[in-house]
Every structure is written in C-alpha cells, then in structure tokens.
Amino acid sequence: VQEQRGKGINEEEIVNFRLATAGAILACAAVAAAGCGSSSSKGGGATSGGASTPKNASTVTPAMAANPSGNVTWCIGKDTTGAFSQVVKLYNQSHPNVHVRLLELPTSADQQRTQLVQREQAKSPECDVLGMDVIWTAEFAAQGWLKDVTPAIQARSSEFIPSTVKTTEINGKNWAIPFNTNAGLLFYNKGKIHTPPTTWQQAYQMAKSSGGIGFQGQSYEGLTVNYLEMLFSAGGSVLSPDGKKATIDSPQAQQVLAFMQQGLKSGAAPQANLTYMEEESRNAFQTGKVSLLRNWPYVYALARQAKVNFGVEPLPTWAGGKPASVLGGYNLGISAYSKNPGAALSFINYATEPAAQKKFFIKSSLPAVVASVYHDPAVIKAQPFAPPLLKAVESGQARPVSPVYPQISEAIYKNVYSALSSGTSPKSALSQAQSQINSALKTF
Amino acid sequence: VATAQATLARPRQRRRSGLPERRLAAAMVSPSLIVILIVAAFPIGYAIWLSLHQYSVIHPGLSRWVGLDNYRDALGSGSFWSAVKVTFIFTAISVTLELALGMGMALLMHAAFKGRTVLRAVVLVPWAILTVGTALTWKYIVSPDSGFFNQILKALHLPGANKVWLAENGYAMTVMVIADVWKTAPFMALLLLAGLQVIPEELEDAARVDGASAWQRFVKVTLPLLRPAILVALIFRTLDALRIFDLPYVLTQGSNGTTTLSLYSYQQLTQNRLIGPGSALAVLTFIIVMAVSFVYIRFAGENIRQMAAEK
C-alpha cells in the first residue's frame, strides 16, 4: 500500500506539472499576438506638437526625378496578372541608370498593411515606393512614414481625375500619388430588368418585384462603403469639413438607414445580404438569386464568363440627391526612409502616366486615375464598363481621410449592422455611431 | 515537454539519493524551462508592458505611460463584458456537447469490432482540418443561397428553409457551436478512448459477475476510473474554446452576438492599431484563461489525490 500511495502522489505531481505547463503554453498563445504583432516605436522621437501630419516631413520635388539613378524597390500587393512586373520591365529598359525591383506583398489587403506597417515601424529603407489602399494613406502620413509629394502632384494636377487626388490629401498637402481607383457600379440582370433604375428608391422598388437587390451587408468595411454611397448621395457626411467632429447623426443619415432597414424588411433586399461580402453577393447575382447588384467593377469579367445577360450602370442616386460613390483603389507613396526618393518619384510618374495606366486597366482591370484612358477605344473594348465607371469615379468621394479611419469605419458598420440585423432604431444606432466617432477622433 | 517530464520522473525508484537527484532533475529540465521562458514568458511580459502604455495613432512615434487606464477602460466598457459573456456561453455549451458526444464516440470505438482501427483514423479527420477550413465549410453549408442545409429543409418541407442562419442572434452562435463540436468532438473522443483503454477489463467483468447492469457498470466503474482522462480532456478543450477566434472571424466577423474575447482584442489591436488597449484585452484574456485553468488544475489535483487515497 505504501508503495502504491507513493506512486500515486508522484503521478499527481507529474500531472500537475504537465497541466500547468500545458495551461501556460495554451494561454500564452492568447497574448502572443500582442507580443509579435506590435513592435511599436517607443516615445521620444520626432514629435509634431499636435498636428496630425508631421511638419518636418521632407518633400520630393519633380526636379529630383529629372535624372534618376540607382535602385528602387516597389512594394505592393501580389502581381496576379503580371502587369506590375511588365511595367517595371518597361521602365527599367527606358531608364538604364535605374533598377526598379518589384516586391510583392500578400493578396489580402490586411496582410499588405501589416507588412508595410512593420517595415515602416522598423524604419526600414527596403521599400521606396509603397502601394497603399486609399484608406491607409492618412494613417501612414500621420505616422510620418511618407514623404510630402505636393509639388509632384501640382506639376501634374491637370492629368488626374480630381476626386482621386483627394484621397491623398491631408492638411492641404499631398502624401501620395493616385495609382488606381475604383468605384461601385450597379449591375442588373437584363432578363428581369429592362430599364435600369436611376434612383435608389426606384432600384428597391424594382428589386421587390424582380428578385431583389444584392449588396455587401456583412459587418465589415464593405458595409461602411455601401452605406456611405447612399449617405453621400443624400447629402449627408461623416465628419465636419475641418475633420474634428462627427456629423453622422443627421436627418439624412437617419433617412438612409431607415430606407435600408425597410428594404430588408420588405424583401426588396434579401436578408442574406447581412452575410454577404463581395464574393457572396456576386454569387447571388450570377446564380439569379438577385436581379440587381451593387459591387465593384471586377464582377464584370466574371459575370460575363458565367454567361449572365447583364448590364452595368453608375450607382443610382438618392431621390432628389446628387450622384455619389465612394472611392477605392491604391495610392503610391514614397517611404520617409527611402534612400532614393528622386528615382522613386520618376518611377511613380511613369506608372501613373496614360501609357502605363492603360496597361494596368486592360491587363489587370485596375481602373485608371487618368481620365483620358477611359476614352481609349482599346480600353473600352477590353473593359466595356469604363464609361459608366468614369462617371462614378468623377462623382466619387474619399472615405473620411483620417489616421483613425479604421475606428471611424468600425463605428459606422457595427451600428449600421445592428440597425439592419437586430432592428435597433436608426436614431439610436446613429447617435451611438456619432459618439463612437467623436471619441475615436480624440484618440491619442 | 510532457514526455520529457514523464521519462525524467520515472527512475525515482532508486530512492537513496533523494536530494541530489532532484537537483539533477532540475538541471536537466532547465534547458526546456529556459526555452519556455524565452518563447512564452517574454511575449507575456512584453504584452503587459504594452498594455500599460498608449501608443499614439495620431502623433508619430509618441507613446505615454498610462498605468492601469487601459484596463479600467476595458473593464468599464460594455463591449468587453459582452465579449466575456459570448466567450463563456460558447465555451460552456460547446465543451459540454463535445464531452457528451466524444464520450459516446469513445465508448463506441472502445468496443471490439471489425474495422475498429479504420474507424479510429476516420473519426479524427474533422479534427485534422484547419479551423479556418472548418469555418468556411460551415459557412457554405448554412449559406441561404447555395448551402445544402437550407436545401434539405426545403426538400423536406420543414420550416426555416429561407432562414439566414448567420444573420440572426442565437442562430449565429448555434452554427458556431455546431462547427466547433463537429471539429473537436473527435479529439475529445481520442483522449477519452486513451483513458478507457487503461481501465483493466477485470473490473468490468467483476461488476458483470456481481450482476450490475450496463448503465450501472458505466456509472459506477467506468466513469470514476475515467475521471482523470475526462479532466485532462476538459482542460484542453476549455482553454481552447476560451480563445476561439477563427470561427467567428470567418463565419460572422463577430456580428450577431459572436464577438469573442480573442476577436475583440484582434479588432482593437490589429484593425484599429490601438496597441495599448488591445494588449490590455489580450492580457485580460490571458488572465481569464489562466484563472480557469488554475481552477481546473486544483480540481484535477484534488481529484487524483482523492483517488490515490481511496486506493
């Protein structure tokens, strides 16, 4: 008995220890995310005395790009169609003194951002040219990771579609150069709808009798975009012109939200929209579950492959409102830690001139930021949605350009979602969003 | 580490040299302890350090010491407590179901029949699938447009054929629980099966001779002897379930009452880049998980001590 008891206690000790270790390891994983993902620069450093962009940021002028030489690295999301590397090759051929290298980041936008943030936080000079989603531009500028490219934009201001330049602008300065743009379009099934709607009210009316309208209604960034498209058209806004106060708790915002709520209730927009992101809603359209669809231009080629008989138009407007859309796309910035900003600018200019823009548009379906490209017959042949898209982009608005944009967007999509899915009243959802945005704006 | 522990502790029969041997054991364990310290303790310490600061998203490179402010904010916010509630509800329901189902599967696999080995391997397949894969699969299964769940309901003329399961409070959580149970019940079953196999058959036979019914044999003989295995399985599953992230991230993005603690801290930390508050949430998650595992370990220790005493 003695022997057995001894053994028992022994085992207990082992078990205890094993469990403790296992517990500790498992639990650690919860915190590990914090440990690895967030190596942040410590205080001290360059302060900016309250301004939201650094005052001492260095400026890149067109003159610096006159005689480019040396190495440049372009960091941007995966080159899925080969157009990026093609343009890099052409540039290198025509500029023998410069060698541009393409560094491909992951496909997912979140991953791209994380990778760029890590490099910039480490003050890495590896990436000279940063490919940034339009909604990160403000954050990157505020963190002092970008060079001021205002003179470079001014020198070419007549070339760009003005709305796309807006996405690069903070405190009256430009921190990046538009690279490609994007705007939502309305796809409609020609078998079910003969004349496309021109107002959202008409669209929902038609949807009710023809199979429904699809949009991106999951609780994520896409819902913010969908909501803002209607809100901007109805004349509403998110922030005051000086960007210091939330203005989303407005009568227009309430009307728009109530309208979307009603659309789901009446069946004009199927409940399934609340689970849709881009791809799910595209599937619903292609399989005939909905007859109208708000989505990005990429749907065009895929729906055509799927042999859907459909048409495409700029987004409807709010009845009595103005045309509006919300811009997507990428900007190219020059890293504050770049050792070769002149050549970087030379390359950016090359990549944003009509010739290269046409290539990106045709080959990769990346809509150009230069208006003339949209009228090019070769472009229209390859991307027949170019004319409606140009209209959409021209009337496009930037999402709030703010370093705390992720929090602003979260306040919008979470509260809009709760109004749409669990019937929170538009009034209380929006006043909640308003106060959350206001506290986000006070973020240190 | 666990196996190293087991092999180290065994040659204890040579009792004469008690203390030096303990020291030797300590020396031999120390390399792995150092590795654990570097791999585990450093990130924890660093996360705690981060959680006591605020890192500016407006002013480049600026940070400030805020003491426990981030914790005060988290504990005072409705989002945190709702995430705690969601996490615990999810854990309680899914782990209970997994235990019940896993027990059934283990008993079945324990019975001797042809093809038992194959079944044991097959049963583990769901567990071998990545959680993200599981989540995507279930998202597709319950999708209102093309998912087969609604198609089956429609074919059988049952109610709910047009329901959007993931867009409603309650149902979204239900799908999440089902996906988790589907994936991890086999794991539970495997752990319990291992426990079942070390129970001597003679005990069962003796009970049978004494005239105990199948249910009595299960409750009075199998279950008590299985207790340590059950506890280990429960600890593993509970700690895992408390940290659930992939399922809500893929299935619902945290909508409709499925924002768990891990998802919430991810949103704060990665999406909003609120490093201080996000780290505080991660540390709170860590504390909660530690507290729960501590309770379990106390309970497990107590239990095994009791069993030893009974012997």
Image (tube, coloured by chain):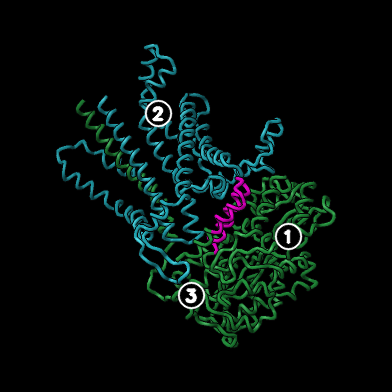
Q: What amino acid type should be assigned to the residue bearing mark 1?
A: Trp
Which mark lies nearer to you, 1 or 3? 1
- A251 is higher (above) or lower (below) than A397: above
Q: Is residue B1 left or right of residue A132?
A: left
Toward the left, the furthest residue is B16
Tag 3 residue = A51
The boundaries of the magenta stretch are A405-434
Could you tell me which residue is drawn at 74 percent across and 69 percent down? A390
Could you tell me which residue is drawn at 36 percent across and 24 percent down? B200
How far across and how far down the image is residue A429, in percent? 58, 52
Toward the front, the furthest residue is A251
Local secondary structure at mark 3: loop
A406 or B151, nearer to the observer: A406
How far across and how far down the image is residue B250, in percent? 56, 49
B128 or B15, nearer to the observer: B128
Instruction: Classify mark 2: residues with Cα within 10 Å, few (<14), some (14-19) or many (20+).
Output: few
The quadrant the N terminus of chain A occupies is: top left
The quadrant the C terminus of chain A occupies is: bottom left
- Return the chain for callout 1: A
Cα separation, mark 2 vs mark 1, equals 69 Å
Which one of the lettered chains is coloured cyan?
B
Mark number, residue A318: 1
Is residue A336 in view from this perspective?
yes
Local secondary structure at mark 2: helix
- Return the chain for callout 3: A
Disc with the residue nearer the chain's start (1 vs 3): 3
Q: What amino acid type should be assigned to the residue bearing mark 3?
A: Ala
B126 or A41, nearer to the observer: A41
- For residue B162: magenta? no
Which one of the lettered chains is coloured green?
A
Instruction: Classify mark 1: residues with Cα within 10 Å, few (<14), some (14-19) or many (20+).
Output: many
Local secondary structure at mark 1: loop
